[in-house]
Amino acid sequence: RKKGFIFDLDGVIVDTAKYHYKAWKRLADQLGIPFSKESNEQFKGVSRKRCLELLLEWGNYKATPEQFEEWMAEKNRDYLEYIHKMDASEILPDVPRILQYLKLHHMPMAVGSASKNAKPILEKVGLSHYFDFVVDGTQVTKAKPDPEVFLIAANKLGVDPRNCVVFEDAVAGIEAANAAKMTSIGIGDGQILSHANYVFRDFTDIDLGFIAELIDKG
Ligand code: G16
Ligand code: MG
């Protein structure tokens, strides 16, 4: 049966979480809202709009719609400055090894990300050519844990969702993959990603034999 492979971007392919953190931290400081690395964990896989809503809730801060828009734009301007400086050295360890193996076996591949900046990031790090489709925050209306982003990706790939495999680092992303009835592979901490079908600390822990089994299974 035809298989499809879908990758989250932030935290799976590249570590942009540190740049999201810096940009949110700057805005939070400016607004006088406490914001830590732990708070940033809750922003992973979550849309920009929802992140700002959360930040303002935590700070008990009321914003006018105009302020809200301005702060979202400000955060993104900061974030883009970091993105502009990215290069291939920021690809997470062993990601190309897995992508190359899948490509060698002619597997359909897509990115499924909540980010509206997914395409420029892939260009910057030189990985765009691996992916048949990039489904990102500009194309989805319902954020993870809703399965929409992954279902759109499966549809574009022309693969039944049950035959798709998703690599994700966020709890909301694993929930989204499970809700789409896809095979979910958590990248990160097994205790945090306990709902994933499989969990690996990072791609260096993934054996190509395991990928071969995913390709052949079912
Ligand atoms: C990513 C990050 C989130 C970020 C979101 C939106 O999702 O994990 O922290 O808030 O994108 O990003 P942007 O502000 O660039 O639109 P993913 O799904 O790639 O992990
Ligand atoms: Mg992620």
Image (cartoon, helix red, strand yellow):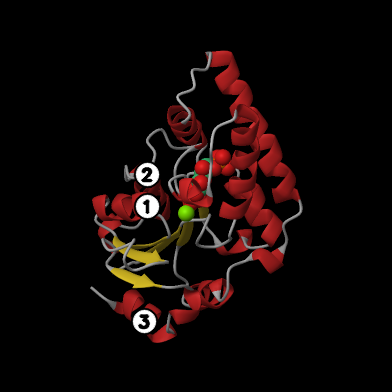
Q: Residues within 10 Å of mark 2 (few under 14, many from 20)?
A: many
Q: Are marks 2 and 1 in contact (CB under 8 Å)?
A: yes
Q: Is mark 2 within 8 Å of ligand 1?
A: yes
Q: Is mark 1 within 8 Å of ligand 2?
A: yes
Compare marks 2 and 1 and give the one earlier in the sequence.
2
Q: Is residue 86 above or below residue 100?
A: above
Q: Secondary structure at mark 3?
A: helix
Compare marks 3 and 1 and give the one earlier in the sequence.
1
Q: Nearer the viewer, residue 9 or 199?
A: 199
Q: Is residue 2 above or below residue 44?
A: below
Residue 1 image position (x, y, % from top left)? 28, 69
Q: Residue at x 59, y 18 (%)?
A: 67
In this rendering, would 77 be left or right of 214?
right
Question: CA separation, marks 3 and 1?
Answer: 21 Å
Q: Secondary structure at mark 2?
A: loop
Residue 115 image position (x, y, % from top left)? 53, 44
Residue 66 visible in image: yes
- Name the residue beneath numbered marker 1: 173
- Name the residue beneath numbered marker 3: 210
Specify the quadrant that holds the C terminus.
bottom left
Residue 16 image position (x, y, % from top left)? 60, 54
Q: Amino acid at mark 3?
A: Phe
Q: Amino acid at mark 2?
A: Lys
Q: Nearer the viewer, mark 3 or mark 1?
A: 1
Q: Residue at x 64, y 46 (%)?
A: 22
Residue 72 image position (x, y, % from top left)? 59, 29
- Name the residue beneath numbered marker 2: 144
In this rendering, would 174 be left or right of 96?
left
Q: Amino acid at mark 1?
A: Gly
Q: Quadrant of residue 189?
A: bottom left
